[in-house]
Image (spheres, rainbow, N blue to C red):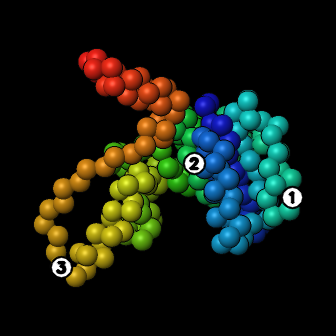
Amino acid sequence: MNCKESIHIKTKEKDESSYCWRKRSVGQEFLRVLDERNFPMDELVLFGSKRSAGTTYTFRGKQIEVKLLQHNDDFKGVDIAFTSAGAGTSKEVSRKTITKYGAVMIDNSSAFRMDADVPLVVPEVNAEDALERPRGVIANPNCTTIQMVVALKAIEKLSHIKTVHVSTYQAASGAGAAAMDELYEQYRQVLANEPV
């Protein structure tokens, strides 16, 4: 599994949530939001890859060690699992590990976005769609789409929208080091009047 890091949250008696993220900044932001919103929980468990297992994070004054994410019974008793570990990892762990014992997997990757039996949900727009989830998975669109549909819903309430033409431009850094190297090389080619 390629998951770098994840969070597993136990709330009240048996309610548990998990979160699996790809980059430390995403996971740290998730922890910040959980804390800021005072998300109720009794226990927080972090999961990660072999490289991240053993790393510790502080959450609400408590040191929490990252456990290895693997196919086992770690998700038994979990009600909600938040994942953002990339499409391949999400597909691999969805049925074999996370939803196996009834957890609802809320996935931030592109793995399930086009699947007819997985609701694509933006809570401010269509939260009710999350109630019907035959595979136990809820997907969300990418970041630019989320912001756009929240704004479009408000406009639609005022006047029906017939057509929307969209172009998005996202940072190459979001695709990782290889994309940054490619961008650098393309800039070099342009400046040297070489074909790109």
What is the C-alpha distance between the residues marked 1 and 3? 50 Å
Q: Quadrant of residue 123?
A: bottom left
At mark 1, the secondary structure is strand
- What amino acid is labelled 2 in the image? Thr
Mark 2 or mark 1: name the one nearer the start of the chain: 1
Vertical comparison of 72 with 80: above or below: above
Label of residue 62 in the image: 1
- What amino acid is labelled 3 in the image? Ser
The residue labelled by disc 3 is: 159
Vertical comparison of 167 with 60: above or below: above
Label of residue 32 in the image: none
At mark 2, the secondary structure is strand
What is the C-alpha distance between the residues marked 2 and 3? 36 Å
Q: Quadrant of residue 31?
A: bottom right
Q: Which is nearer the eye, 1 or 158? A: 158
Residue in the image at 51% along x and 33% along y: 176
Q: Residues within 10 Å of mark 2 (few under 14, many from 20)?
A: many
Is 183 on the left or on the right of 16, as rendered? left
